[in-house]
């Protein structure tokens, strides 16, 4: 019996590894920004030494690129820094996994090139997100600044956010790209509903920062942070916790959350709905004398939500450091500022330079820099894909596999304009749609903070989805119960069975 069990356990691991090995090796295309510019203006360089215009010391960037190419410890130690901030774990790009797909075995499309109208459209959206950060979601339909943002984005030659008949409207402004993102409140019910937490119930009111608390708007502050200096000021906090009511609140949630926090909370909320919310394929729906627990129950679901998050980060870190090295919006804004100030000439598309939002920002701050929600600006790893988004795609995919996507969430709500209370919302909202929306909230909440672009979120979610599918494919092998497979609706709307 022992030998048979040992042999079976080995066969499961062997067959899972062979299934991953049999998949074709992907191509990893890039935008070529990393090689197109001798001064590396299209690459992520934060934390390295820069000149007074914010251009990286070329030798420092070449040292970083050498280390990423060789993977040698001595080369990583030789990377020169411009301040005290340390690069965010580039060696994680080389890590392996024992379940699911290898991080180097999943591909993404290239990011929009620096000089493209597409990148200019994304940057214009990020500028508007910053400018409208304090406007309550509840007021989007009537606020004139929101209407101006929608009109400006509509007029762009290449903006790829949601539109209605070719028009950006207050109803689809800043939202995710799935159909579910346009239904009901901007914020998912899984960021509003109470969280059952053992013997406690957690009310989802969070600390946030004060209205107008923006950073990196002076060249001196911006340049110091690009060089890796600590931020010269701290954030100003609101005295009272609140529900997520505007872009600033959402940006702060994804500033201080732990990696899979929103999705652990969603899992606990979903488990609180009882067995009626479980997916129809759950084998224990048809077993009358046993209950799910270690397999197909709460412990398994919660474990996989946490477990897939680290696999998502490994996949994201490979793309961030070894493939794309896309610059962050705060660095692009530095190019905009130096260009419009006449200090430098950069190959930026005219649509961002002529955006209606830039005179508003310059009139308030005296620069064309991006007002950041975080004093330290972006973290010290490159933009594409967003780590939050890759985790979001992975964790939401696990939850969609275990729960009934058509299950109607009871008593839909949204935050009041001041965030101090929840008010009823009439929309009929379903689990699958609100999980898609949750993934978009967590992904694009980082855009609201100024640290990411739209494609960082969208393609990060798609990458995370693939990470989760490959992990679930391995876990399907591990259980003895009769099981037809995990079924879910992907972000592109197609139905998928594992």
Image (cartoon, rainbow, N blue to C red):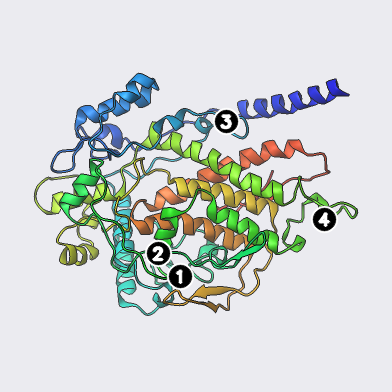
Q: Position of residue 379 (x, y in %)?
A: 35, 45
**Which tag is nearer the camera, tag 4 or tag 2?**
2
Q: Residue at x 39, y 73 (%)?
A: 136
Label 3 – label 2 distance at C-alpha: 36 Å
Front disc: 1 or 4: 1
Query: Mark 1 or mark 4: which comes first in sequence?
Result: 1
Query: Which label number is shown at residue 208?
Result: 2
Which structural element holds mark 1?
Answer: loop
Residue 18 seen by the camera: yes
- Residue highlighted by disc 3: 97
Judge by depth and name the residue closer to the eye, 331 or 235. Answer: 235
Q: CA distance from mark 1 to mark 4?
A: 39 Å
Decide which of tag 1 and tag 3 comes sooner along the chain: 3
User: How far from the left and from the top, in percent, is residue 23?
Assistant: 60, 29
> Label 2 near label 4: C-beta < 8 Å?
no
* Element type where label 2 sits in the image: loop
SS under mark 3: loop
Could you tell me residue 144's position as x and y percent? 31, 77
Of label 4 and label 3, which has the lower sequence position? 3
Q: Which residue, given by chain and number where applicable, does mark 1 sit on? A: 242
CA gap, disc 4 and disc 3: 32 Å
Give the total of numbered labels.
4
Q: Residue at x 28, y 47 (%)?
A: 116
Q: Residue at x 40, y 72 (%)?
A: 170
- Seen in the picture, residue 490 relative to 27 is either above or below; the reply is below
Give x and y (percent) for residue 178. 52, 59
The disc label shown at residue 285, or none: 4
Q: Secondary structure at mark 4?
A: helix
Count neighbours of disc 1 (C-alpha within 10 A) and say few if under 14, some if 14 to 19, many if 20 or more: many
Q: Residue furthest left?
A: 342
Q: State which tag comes first along the sequence, 4 or 2.
A: 2
């Amino acid at each position: 019996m022992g030998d048979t069990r040992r042999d079976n356990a080995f066969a499961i691991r062997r067959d899972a590894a062979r299934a991953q090995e049999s998949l074709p090796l992907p191509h990893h295309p890039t935008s070529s920004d990393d090689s197109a510019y001798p001064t590396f203006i299209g690459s992520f360089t934060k934390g390295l030494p820069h000149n007074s215009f914010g251009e990286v010391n070329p030798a420092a960037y070449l040292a970083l690129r050498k280390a990423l190419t060789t993977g040698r410890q001595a080369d990583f130690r030789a990377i020169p820094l411009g301040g005290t901030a340390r690069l965010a774990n580039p060696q994680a790009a080389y890590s392996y996994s024992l379940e699911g797909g290898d991080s180097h075995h999943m591909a993404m499309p290239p990011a929009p090139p620096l000089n493209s109208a597409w990148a200019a459209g994304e940057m214009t959206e990020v500028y508007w997100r910053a400018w409208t950060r304090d406007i309550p979601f509840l007021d989007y339909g009537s606020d004139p600044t929101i209407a101006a943002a929608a009109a400006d984005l509509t007029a762009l030659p290449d903006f790829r956010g949601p539109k209605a008949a070719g028009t950006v409207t207050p109803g689809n402004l800043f939202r995710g790209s799935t159909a579910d993102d346009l239904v009901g409140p901007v914020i998912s019910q899984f960021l509003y509903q109470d969280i059952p937490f053992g013997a406690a119930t957690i009310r989802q009111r969070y600390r946030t920062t004060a209205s107008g608390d923006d950073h990196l708007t002076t060249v001196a502050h911006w340049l110091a942070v690009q060089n890796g200096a600590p931020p010269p000021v701290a954030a100003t906090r609101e005295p009272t916790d609140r529900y997520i009511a505007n872009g600033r609140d959402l940006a702060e949630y994804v500033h201080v959350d732990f990696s899979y926090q929103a999705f652990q909370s969603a899992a606990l909320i979903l488990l609180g709905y009882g067995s009626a919310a479980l997916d129809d394929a759950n084998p224990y729906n048809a077993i009358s004398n046993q209950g799910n627990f270690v397999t197909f129950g709460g412990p398994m679901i919660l474990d996989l939500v946490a477990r897939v998050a680290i696999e998502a980060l490994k996949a994201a870190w490979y793309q961030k450091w070894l493939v794309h090295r896309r610059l962050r919006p705060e660095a692009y804004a530095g190019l905009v500022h130096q260009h419009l100030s006449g200090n430098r000439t950069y190959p930026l598309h005219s649509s961002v330079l002529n955006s209606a939002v830039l005179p508003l920002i310059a009139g308030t701050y005296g620069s064309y820099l991006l007002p950041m929600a975080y004093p330290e600006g972006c973290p010290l790893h490159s933009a594409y894909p967003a780590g939050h988004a890759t985790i979001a795609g992975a964790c939401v995919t696990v939850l969609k596999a275990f729960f009934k996507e058509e299950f109607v969430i009871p008593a839909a709500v949204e935050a009041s304009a001041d965030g101090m209370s929840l008010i009823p919302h009439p929309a009929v909202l379903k689990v699958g749609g609100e999980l898609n929306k949750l993934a978009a909230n967590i992904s694009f909440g980082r855009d609201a903070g100024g640290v990411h672009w739209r494609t960082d979120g969208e393609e990060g979610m798609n990458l995370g989805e693939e990470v989760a599918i490959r992990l679930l494919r391995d876990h399907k092998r591990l259980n003895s119960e009769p099981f037809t497979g995990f079924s879910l609706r992907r972000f592109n709307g197609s139905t998928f069975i594992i």
